[in-house]
Image: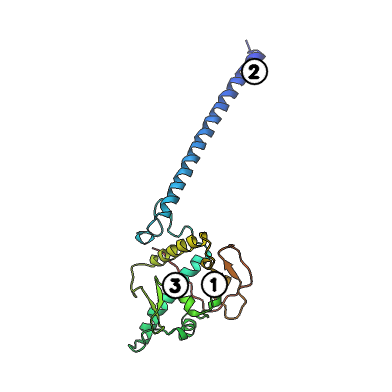
Amino acid sequence: GEPSLDEELQKLKAEGEEAIAAAEKELEELETACAEQAKSEEALEEEFKELDVFGVDDILDIGQGVPVFKDFQLEDWALLSHIFELNLLVHAFVRDVADPERPGVHISHLDFYYRKYYGRELRPQDFGVETLREVVTITGDKVLYLTPKMVLATQLDAEFENLGVFAKIIEAFRRDRAQRMDLGEEGAALKISTSRVGGAGDSGGKGGHYDTRRHSYGGKGGRGKGAVSTTVGG
């Protein structure tokens, strides 16, 4: 005959208990997987901290698909573009002038030639500094520097394997800057104009600044004409 009401209830109870057990097992497996993932990410982060930046073969994948620039903020990309442009300017000037008596751009003429090549001003205030000399050496002397005669120069040859070296340089600088900021060094913080962070200059607009200590924006930036955008990879 047909099952009694009590039998139906017992069947439903058994099915419910089975479903709960399966759900609890699935939840346990998920928690285990999440814990393993977190542990893996922590290990990867520790490896990243100990990474020899300049020993990286592929800046797009230092392991598990992680790029060397994974922690870059907007100001890091702005600095990368900045040192790339000045490095290119050094070599372009030497090639275009082709005069042994004019080995490079003197610091007093840097803004003129920067505008000539890139169509926008090179303003110290866009980088939170007061002089063009500070603009040149903002990331130290690992790439750009001034000779004793105050001529802009670069550590990099005109021909190099790939543009990834710029990402490595900025990552090394970012790490050093972060360490100095952690130690409370006030001068380690960058204040880069929002117009510069946006990748374009402004010959007359009022630029705000991107403060690395607050990670916030302020002010109004504008876009200039003739801006050069750059891409780094490899």
Q: Residue at x 49, y 76 (%)?
A: 135
Asked whether residue 198 appears in the rendered view, the answer is: no
Amino acid type shown at disc 1: Arg
Considering only vertical position in the picture, is 64 above or below 128?
above
Counting residues from the N terminus, which is met first, the one under dot 3 or under dot 1? 3
Residue pointed to by mark 1: 196
Residue pointed to by mark 2: 9
Q: Residue at x 47, y 81 (%)?
A: 114
Q: Quadrant of the N terminus?
A: top right
Amino acid type shown at disc 2: Leu
Residue 143 at x, y percent in the picture? 39, 72
Rendered image quadrant of residue 146: bottom left
Residue 171 at x, y percent in the picture? 44, 62
> Which is nearer the eye, 70 or 60?
70
Question: For the view shown, which residue lies furthest in the top direction?
Answer: 1
Distance from Cα at disc 1 to Cα at disc 2: 71 Å
